[in-house]
Every structure is written in C-alpha cells, then in structure tokens.
Image (spheres, helix red, strand yellow):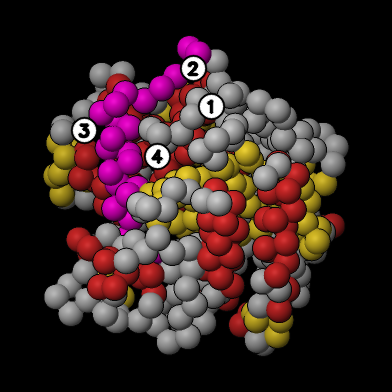
Amino acid sequence: MTQAALAQALREAVLAQDFGATLDPQDEGRPIRHFPSIDLAVAAFPESGPPVWANVAFSREHPQGLIAELPADGGPVRNLRFLADQRDADGNSIAWRPGSDWSAMDWVPLAGAAGEGGGRVVAPYPASLLKLMVLVGIGRLVDQGRAGWWQSLEYGGRERVVADWAYDMVTWSSNEATSALVTLMHAAGAIRRDGGREVRNELHALFASLGLTTLRLANTTAEGGWGNAAGSGVGQIQMTAWDTVRLLWWLDPTAPRAPWLAADAPRLSPESRNQAMHALQDQALHQVLSSGALAGVPGWVPGLPARLPSRWLQPDGSLQAGEVSLPGDLRRFAAGGEVWFAHKTGNTENYASDAGIVRGIAPRRRHYLIALLTSLGSRYAPDSRCPTTWRIPALGAAIDARMAAWLEA
C-alpha cells in the first residue's frame, strides 16, 4: 500500500460512516447542522518495506475531506492551515454550537502549524488525550533528575508516588491525577508563570525539538489547573492527529526509526518509556475507536478489536476502574481480541479523541499507530455511558480491517 492509497482508504472509511447524519440533541435531535471536524492519521509498519503514513481532515468547510501533504521523511503537514479552537469569555466552546458562524469568528493560527496555503482546519480540543503530553513531560523530568517515578507527591490531601498518579491519569483518565502532575511540572520549573502569563514551557521546547509544534499544553497553573476555568483548556491545549501519531512513534519501543528525527534528538530513558507504555497498555477506557468496555450498553457497536485488560474486571465481568463503572459481562473481551491497543482517549460534551499503538496478538502481525481527534463528544452519544456516537468505533473497526488485510497479507 502506498501513501496515497492509505490516505484514500482513510478518507473512504470516514465517508462511509455518514457522520453528517449524526443526530444533535442541542438542535432538537435533528441531523448535525454542520459536518463535524475529524482529524485522522495513521502510520503503518509493514514487516517488509518502509513505513507508510497518511493524514486526512474533515470539517464543515471540507465535508469530503482533505488529504494532508506529508513529506518523504514524515515531517510536518505542508498543505493544511491549522487554527486553534475557541471558547467565549465564560469558558464555553463556541465553535461547535448548532448556530455557530465560523465566518464571524476571529481565528488564531495554531502555534507552529505548518503551511500558509491549502485548506484551513480548526483543530478540536483534544480533551483527555492531552494527558499523553503530561505523561511525556513527567518522563522528561524524571530523566533529567528533577523528579522520580517513585517519589512521593501530595495533592488534594492525598500522598502517592508519581508513578501511581501517572497510571491513574492514563488508565482511567483521573483528572485529579492530572492536576497533581501539572503541579509537579510547575514545582520542578518545567513550566513557569510570571505576571499572570506563561514565560517558560519546557514541554513546548521538547515538542519543537521533535518537530511536533502543533502539540501545546499552554497556560496551566501552579495549583494544577489545566481546564477552561483555570485559563487553560480549549484554545490553549491543542493536538493534531499527525503530530500525535509522531509522538506515539517516538514512544513506541518496537517502531522503526522515526525518519524525520536527527540521531541526537531527545529520547525518553528505557525506564520512563516503560512507565508510559505500561499505563497506555493497561487502558481501561476502550470506548472510542475500540469499544469492548461498552459491550454491556444497549445497541453496542464493535470497534477496533482490542483485548481488554483483565485487571479492571469484577467477578461478574463488569468493569470498575477508578471512578468508572460499566455494565455487562466483559470477560470475553479480556480473553479474546485480535490486537493490543496501548492508547489514551479523551471526551467532553463537544469532543472525542483516541490515539495509540496497535499490535497484533499472535498469530496476527499488524503494527500501526492511529490518532483521531473530533468534535463528536458525548452530546452525540446514544447512552449516558458512551463518550460519543457509535459511528466512531465503527470507524475504528473499518480502519483495522483494512490494516489487517494489508499488513497481514
């Protein structure tokens, strides 16, 4: 499969889901007034041959999709102009309301986005996918001797080791754990504010050194604030699918060499990489591209066929992970599945995202990276226990079927 063929396959997979027919409760249950924003990227690693990658983007302005122009070395997108998401003075996401008028909004270019021409793409807020960036930031602090995975960290009246905070932040998306680790980044000097504004952000410097300049974790606070109310959140924290896939490539211990990186590019130590991969592999929230955790919800639609980590299952097969409880006997998903999916999800009312590393469970051999960021949050979900429309896991299943047919031929 060529880059062009993969891009066309991703585009066709999105169009086949008919996202424009998604019902919007905020618009009296009518089909969504504007085609949703969908940023999707995949990098595949054939057993014989070089890596193959592609990125496609959709929005109300581009409902048939745009294919990103990606250089031969896997560097930044060339032909898409990414814009930062928006919120109003009250902290509300305004770009995704049924009556929103993009032509009347003042858009801010996403810092570091490549290209002045081509189609413009509003990058949806990544929601809790942002915690992947925090995880990387903590790993760097540990590797620099400014923090330790096994050091105690107090937050909110609780004292735990950093590794445990990080594990909960990733596996069941604990917001408290995220805040605890944000305080650590500030306390260690990796992020510094002065006069009410951010004057130092070493995470941004790391991403710039890796060529991932659309990854931004801006305007968090020393008290652990990272949401809209703290002055961060929507419009301040950004990710794009292609840069997220490349961050995963940088993390994946079994991926081939990343061709856009210099030999002296920063790396995580084996210990920090192992900590990150351990948390991603134990992900409990298989609810977006993969959907095994939702199999007890009426109307369930299968997604990317990932094995569910058994550690989260109760004796009756239901799932309990931190504050997350999901019904049904899910034991067949812990015993079966075709792939391991080491990933992180994100979800709010307006956003759903998922990104991770897919590896086939023997005898299956596929290996690829995938990242999806969308404006299809829980307001479009068919059930209060779902983070998004069933069309998203259906998309995950369709993409995986194409990848399996190609990578395991």
Estimate how packed mark 1 is, as few (under 14), some (14 to 19) or many (20 or more) residues with alpha carbons within 10 Å.
some
Instruction: Please tell me the numbered disc located at residue 134.
Output: 4
Q: Is residue 118 left or right of residue 91?
A: right
Tell whether label 1 touches label 2 (CB within 8 Å).
yes
Q: Amino acid at mark 3?
A: Trp
Span colored in magenta: 263-286
x 55%, y 35%: residue: 48
Does residue 48 sit above or below 306 in this rendering? above
Q: Which residue is mark 1?
A: 258
Q: Which of the numbered marks, if any, corresponds to residue 149?
A: 3
In three-dimensional space, the C-alpha distance between marks 2 and 1, rounded to whole angstroms, equals 10 Å
Q: Quadrant of the N terminus?
A: top right
Marks 1 and 4, the one that precedes in the sequence = 4
Considering only order in the chain, which callout, 4 or 2, is on the residue closer to the N terminus? Answer: 4
Relative to 211, say whether 180 is above or below: below
Label whose residue precedes the other's in the sequence (4 or 3): 4
Q: Which residue is mark 2?
A: 265
Q: Amino acid at mark 1?
A: Ala
